[in-house]
Amino acid sequence: MYQPLEGKVAPLKEYVHITVVVLSYWVISMVTVFINKSLLSSDFFSLDAPLFITWSQCVVSAGICFSLSRLSKVFPKGVHFPEGNPLDWTTVKSVLPLSLLFTLMISTNNLCLKYVGVAFYYVGRSLTTVFNVVFSFVLLQQKTSGRCILCCVVIIAGFWLGVDQESLTDSFSLIGTIYGVVGSLALSLYSIYTKKTLVFVNQEVWLLSYYNNVYSTVIFLPLILVAGEIPTVMSYKYLGELWFWLALGVSGVCGFAIGYVTALQIKVTSPLTHNISGTAKACVQTVIATEIYSETKSFSWWLSNIVVLKASALYAWFKQREMQVKFQEAEAAQKV
């Protein structure tokens, strides 16, 4: 007997939409990591100027945001971008402290990726969750449950085991690991202060991204000068090649795109699903990296990755459940 499919079409379209968004996040995120790794440390590019490369990515992202801002005024029905002026002095004073953290975060992340392998990259930056708990308590006086703290202890143990096992390989870099820890610390502080700064920009994530990238392009200039990268860039053998600038442009576009698909994935799923998706992506990325770079890892090395991934996913799940309970209690109290 014929059964109408109208009721099944809508859920099917929704599932397909969610699947496409999650796959887009996976693909764009992994492509961004591998492109940045090639730009930062491959023999082919051989440009020892990580701050300049990171600065160029900020320039591309700021340019895209500026273009969208202009287009939204010309085609208001087709393009939407929040109204804002990064040159306004009140805006500069309010957002600049966060932009300093943003600059520290993206520079140390890229410096970590320059010195460590893609396979170890996730473990090298895995302490973000631990720093979140510490700074939430110190700066915001927010307490964390015992099971979440236990997850943090397990993450630290996994990180320690990963560093110990990576140190037995030729690809180990102490300075890269230190950059990873500093990057985790910066990301944690950035996440906390983002909540405060979003109030100033009326919760407009894209407007805040626009400001951060514009200010970072300025902040990076003295850092590039102090690091002595200008002579390195000026003497670079491929500086006049179009393909080199196209590679930098693609990297910048990927950096912008990952911000978009991250927000979109959270929108169509949930923060918990996003965290689980990111954890699973990191696992697949690690496996792919070991195949691409023909790396052979020990059982203990793989165990450290599994420990960090599982503990991070459990922490996200516990935290989400606790937030749901608090929301339900507040909702019940409001009804009473």
Image: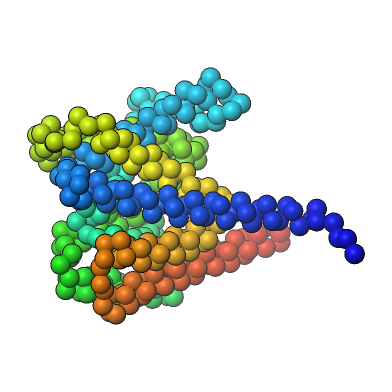
Residue in view at x 59 percent, y 54 percent = 18
Residue in view at x 50 percent, y 55 percent = 23
Decide if residue 189 is in sight here. no
Q: Report the residue that reaches farthest toward the top.
A: 74
Residue in view at x 48 percent, y 64 percent = 276
Give the position of the N terminus as an image quadrant: bottom right
Does residue 314 appear left or right of residue 286 in this picture? right
Q: Give the camera-side residue of 59 and 245.
A: 245
- Above or below, 98 against 271 in this view is above
Give the position of the C terminus as an image quadrant: bottom right
Q: Quadrant of residue 329?
A: bottom right
- Residue 39 x/y as whole percent: 25, 46
- Residue 289 x/y as whole percent: 32, 62
Decide if residue 316 is in sight here. yes
- Above or below, 75 against 26 in this view is above
Q: Report the residue that reaches farthest toward the right.
A: 1
Q: Give the camera-side residue of 213 and 132.
A: 213
- Above or below, 216 against 77 in this view is below
Q: Give the colour scheme of this rendering.
A: rainbow
